[in-house]
Structures are given as structure tokens and as C-alpha cells.
Image (cartoon, coloured by chain):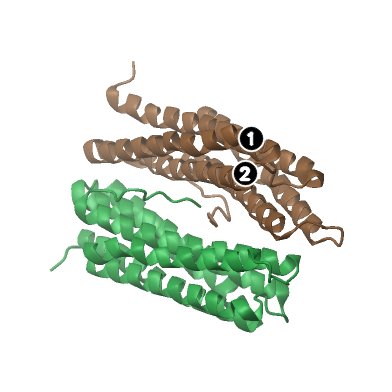
Chain colours: A green, B brown
Amino acid sequence: MRDTYHEELDALSDRLIEMTRLARHAIARATTALLDADLDAAQEVISGDEKLNTLNDEIESSAMALMARQQPVAQDLRTIITALHMSGDLERMGDHAVHIAKIARRRYPDSAIPAELRSIVLEMGHQAEMLVIKAGEVVANRDVETARELDKDDDRMDRLRRKLLERILSSKWEYGVEATMDVTLAGRFYERFGDHAVHVADNLVYLVTGERPKDSYGEG
Amino acid sequence: MRDTYHEELDALSDRLIEMTRLARHAIARATTALLDADLDAAQEVISGDEKLNTLNDEIESSAMALMARQQPVAQDLRTIITALHMSGDLERMGDHAVHIAKIARRRYPDSAIPAELRSIVLEMGHQAEMLVIKAGEVVANRDVETARELDKDDDRMDRLRRKLLERILSSKWEYGVEATMDVTLAGRFYERFGDHAVHVADNLVYLVTGERPKDSYGEG
């Protein structure tokens, strides 16, 4: 049987996995809001972000309490510190979903995304979902091997964003300034969402191996 | 005389203050790179970011070592945890300066900023410098009162960004898609730089008072 201390450590990980679920839901709904000019979806993402903030708060309080009470060392200490990092990343992923939802809300009842870019944006949305779901699995299974793959998976997101920017910069781009701004920012928010998923995976690698993957810095 | 343990705690704060200096320098040079199409300035910001990353690494290692060895509680524990947060924010501020420098480098030998927007961008640059310098003072002096002002100071940055976006969206905007993208993203990077400075100040408030200011979430 696990004692209370180890139960509380496990609870950190449960909360993180719950955050990956919420972040996946948020980005999926944000993509719907964007592509379908769906105002309800946008509002849901915006008001739903509170749950991610609350979980982040709970992880932070719990981490502080554990450190103060148990004075953990080595592996347990790493568990707590990496939980703080991952939680911060997941909380920010929720914020990026909110930013995307706000673009959709601003342009409602129009869609912020020109018809010919819809498939790229949809693919970015799907890629974002896949990255955060994988990050959740990595945390749940303490799976270093899959964690190391996320960086490569994220290259796909970067390629999609470049494709988006190429379209905007092509001579065929016939949309106005608003569309240019919206697509530019939406592209960046999806890219950052992906980066944070990679950081979650990087922190899992650090947790298990004690080694930080190269270039594991947040950039946002 | 301070013992080694407390010297190491103080060293965390010294490193944070050094990071605010480096971040101020980076954003000042990035603004120069942007406004003057100054390629040397851009390169300097891009390669100089390594120093901020290294300091962030050092703070993280030192925090881990302190926690493992000293098993700090209460105020000392808060000092260490907030140092980790602040360091992360300052590291990201350096990244935002790098993003701005890269916009300048991409458009070289042209300037990415149309002539009529130069004063707004300059003001955003100055505001960013002011915010990070104030964050450094707040940390150095553990000054809760000034820390609480930063949120208001940052409103000015948000207003400047809105002004920038209004210009882009006005009927007089006569620049192409590239300029629209560059100005949109540059505006966002300055805004995020400011947000992170506010988070540093918020963490100082938490460190001293034990209370988190409302809405102190990172959004990027």
C-alpha cells in the first residue's frame, strides 16, 4: 500500500494527465470555433480555461506543501519540480487555445480563415491534439522513448506553419489585412501550443533520466 | 556573517538581477535592429541569448541542489520556487527579443517597420526596457509596492499594441503582406515581453507576502 506522501506525489501526475485532457479538448474546440465561426465553441474554450488555471494552482500548492512537509530529495524532488514545469506548460497551452478562440470570436459571424487555408489549419489543429495527447501518455507511462519522439512530431507542426506563411506571402494571396493578421497569429498560437507539448515531454525525460534534452527551452 | 546556505540563496537573486540586465540589453538592441535595419545588432541579440539560457540553467541547478541539500521550508522554499519562476520568465523575455531580432534580420537590408509606425515601436521598446529594469529593482529591493505598479505600467504597453493594430487595420494602411505580418508579430513579442516582466513582479509579491496577485497567469 502506498502511504499518503506517495499518494500525493501520484496525485500530481493524475492532475497533469487531466490537464492534458482539458488542453486537448480546448484546442479541438478552438479549431472548430475558428473553422466554423462557431461562437459557442469559442465561448466554451474561453470560459473553460478556468479549469486549467485551477489545476495549475492546485499542483503548485500541493508541490509547495509536499516540499515543505516532506523535504524530498533526489527522484521525489525531481517529480515535484518537473510537475511544476509541466503544469505551467499545460496552463499556457490552454491560453493559446483561448487566443485562437478569441480570433474566432472577433471575426464572428465570419470565419477568420480563408477557404483555401482551411485544410492547413485543420491539420495544425489535429497535430496540436495529437501532441498533447501524446504528452499525456508520456507522463502517464513515464515513457522516455515516446517522449523523445515528440520533438520530431513537432517538426510537422513547424512545417505546417511555414506552409501557412508561404501561402500568405504568395502572389495569389488576395485577402485583406485582417485575414493576414488573424492567420499570422493563429499560426503562431498553434506552433507555440506544440512547443509547450514538447517541453512537457522534455521534462518527463529529465524526470526519468536526470538529463535535460538539448534545446529544451521555452521560447514563449 | 552569512553562512554558505544563505550566500547561495542570495546568489539566486544576484543571478536574477543579472538576467534583468541582459534582458534589458537584448530588447534595446532588438529595437535598434528593427528600427535601423541593423544586422549587427540583430546578430548580437540572437547569439547573446545563450547567456540568459546559461543563467537560467545555473539557477535551476542551484535551486535543485539547495532543495536537496538544505531541505528548506517556508520563506526559503518560497525564495527558491519563485527564483525558478522568475528565471523562466526572464529566459523567455530573451527569446522574445530574439524573435524581434529575427524579424529585423529577415527583412535586412530593409527595415521591417514602415516609417509612420517607428515612433510607436520605439515607445514599445522603451516601455519594455522600463518594465524589465523595474522588475530588476523590485527583485533587488524586495519592493512589493513597486512590484504592484508593474501591472499598471504594462497597461501602457497593451495600449501601444492596440494603437499599432489600429494603424494596420486603418484604411490608410498601404503596406504589403510582409509588413503586416512583421508588425503584427513584433507587436505581440513586445507585449509578451511586458507580460513576463509583470510575472516577475507578481512572483516577488508572492515571495514577500505569500499571496499571489490575481490574474498572474502566464499566457504565452
Provide residue A94's location: percent of width, then percent of height. Answer: 50, 66
Tell which of B216 and A23 is nearer to you: A23
- Residue B212 visible in image: yes
Label 2 belongs to which residue? Answer: B104
Residue B135 visible in the snapshot: no
Provide the secondary structure element on which disc 1 rests. loop
Q: Is residue B109 left or right of residue A199?
A: right
The amino acid type found where label 2 is placed reads: Ala
Tell me the kind of residue under disc 1. Asp
Q: Relative to residue A203, is residue B98 drawn left or right?
A: right
Q: Position of residue A170 (x, y in %)?
A: 64, 66
Residue under the point 55% across and 47% down: B99
Identify the chain of the residue marked 1, using the numbered disc in the image: B
Residue with the mark numbered 1: B38
Q: Quadrant of the N terminus of chain A?
A: bottom left
> Label 2: chain?
B
* Residue B210 higher or lower than B32, as above or below: below
Question: Which badge, 2 or 1, comes first in the chain's sequence?
Answer: 1
Element type at marker 2? helix
Residue neighbourhood size for the residue with mark 2, other residues' Cα within 10 Å, grouped as few (<14), some (14–19), many (≥20): many
Mark 2 touches mark 1? (CB < 8 Å): yes
Label 2 and label 1: CA atoms lie apart by: 8 Å
Q: Is residue B82 above or below residue A202?
A: above
Relative height, residue B213 to residue A152 (above, below): above
Q: Identify the residue at horizontal 51%, vertical 48% (top origin).
A: B211
State the count of labels.
Answer: 2
Q: Is residue B209 left or right of residue A169?
A: left
Answer few, some or many: residues within 10 Å of disc 1's Cα (few below 14, many 20 plus, some between 14 and 19). Answer: many
In this view of the protein, which residue sits in the foreground, A122 or B89? A122
Seen at 33% across and 20% down, the residue is B2
- Rendering coords of residue B65 (x, y %): 26, 37
